[in-house]
Image: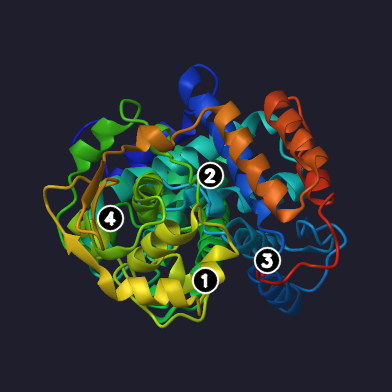
Amino acid sequence: MTEALPLARGLARFLAGLGPGTIPPEVEEKARCCLLNGYGIALGGHATPYAPVARAAAIAMEGEREQGATLWGDGRRVGVAGAALANGALCHGRAQEDSCGAAHLGAVLLPLLTGLFETRRLPMERLLPALVAGYEAGGLFERAYAGRTTPAGLRASPLYGTLAAAAATARALELDEARMAAALSNAAHLAGGILQSFVDGTDEWRYQVGAAAANGLVAAELARHGSVSAPHAFEGPAGFVQAFARTPADVPGLLGRLGSEWATLRVAFKPFPVCAFNQTPVTAALALRARIAGRGIAAVSVRMNPYEVGYAGMDSKGPFSTISGTLMSIPFCVAATLLHGTPTMALMQRYDDPAIAALMPRIGVIADEAVPSLCARIAVTLEDGEALVQDQRMTPADYAYDRAGVSALVRRIGAEEGVPAAAYDRLEAFVDAVPHAAIEDVIAAFALLPKGDAGREAA
């Protein structure tokens, strides 16, 4: 790769070469963890109301198709794009999907790839390379530019997820370097997505991942069928980086990261059904709760990195009427945890809890440059005058569980949500066996979900 090589072409060269011998064992193992986590979290989200909305929309737009992609836990079939929309909402229902920085790429990639492999009977040897291609493409740009695009009101998941979806689709379809570069260029032209839903506490963000998957599919199919696409779609004067990040693209710097700084290894998993940026404050609040031991709380201060505090909805103190509002709110998450313990879907919907409502006004959220990302410093002043401090220092490695850790996480959630253990047995067997497995094994796991309660919020 040279400085003169266009960014789309250089990235395409790397992605097209992903496969046996070029993906390190630790990266392949992390991809297996991502499979287990993504599908497992989706199983645990079966009772949330977002996938039924997206299913109805998908069927209205595309109609049922005998040879289509399966709507997980439902059984009907639609087009791949419609299935990505509906199943993406299922992955996103608990807000507990994986995170690559600020982007939830697994919720984009897994529904899309599952539908592609189901409908087109693609060789399973391509699944892990396609998944890694998606994380590497989306993660490359997220790491470089999310610090600029997120404060501007752009959501990382659809913005960078569209690139990830195009890369994964192109690799799954084994497009050559030129056509993969065209797919990436097309995706750069189709990407977008804003953050206002977090401010208003509404649900658009649940569907953004599916829309990003569909746009990535469109980008790859256009390329496969011969689209003429801008070679400088990323670094050009009106290209992706300048348009969204308002800065020149460092082409050699970005290309130099490929194969040496694996974005897949940055993927983190969420122990709690709250925003990725609230995982550490909740962890700190749980430690403080044990030390508080039921005593009265006079005041709380939460210090976090300005990038996280500035994310839409993070400093909100309500009033709340949706879980989309509470899971983003630092004051709500900290208050609920200090008062009631480990967050669950039910706890996150206690919108009228008088104790939480009384504590939130006494919680100050402070943007502090001295606090690194994924860290939090919570100070509690008790009514008896004692001061307690929890300085919680975390990194992505603390949330990068191995497969045993992922299994424990998704099975714990499944036990809370009435998912049969046999569903996780099937998923784990599938993940173990890939590429010597069938994508129908995943669909069969979702067929084991309890019937009759899909579409409710946990009460």
Q: Quadrant of the C terminus?
A: bottom right
Residue 132 in picture, x, y percent from top left: 50, 36
Q: Are marks 2 and 3 in contact (CB under 8 Å)?
A: no
At a point 54% along the width and 25% down the height, the residue shown is 29
The location of residue 410, given as percent across then percent down, is 63, 42
Q: How far is the residue under mark 2 from the one under mark 3?
A: 17 Å
Please name the residue that numbered disc 1 is placed on: 323
**Disc sitting over residue 168 in the figure:** 2
Say which element carries label 4: helix
- For residue 343, side relative to residue 319 (left or right): right
In 3D space, how far apart are the residues under numbered discs 4 and 1 (Cα atoms)?
Answer: 25 Å
The residue beneath circle 3 is 82
Q: Is residue 160 left or right of residue 426?
A: left
Structural distance between the alpha carbons of marks 1 and 3: 25 Å
- Across and down, in percent, residue 88 comes to 61, 59
Quarter of the view holding residue 313: bottom left
- Residue indicated by mark 4: 146
* 229 with respect to 203 (left or right): left
Comes first in the chain, label 4 or label 2: 4
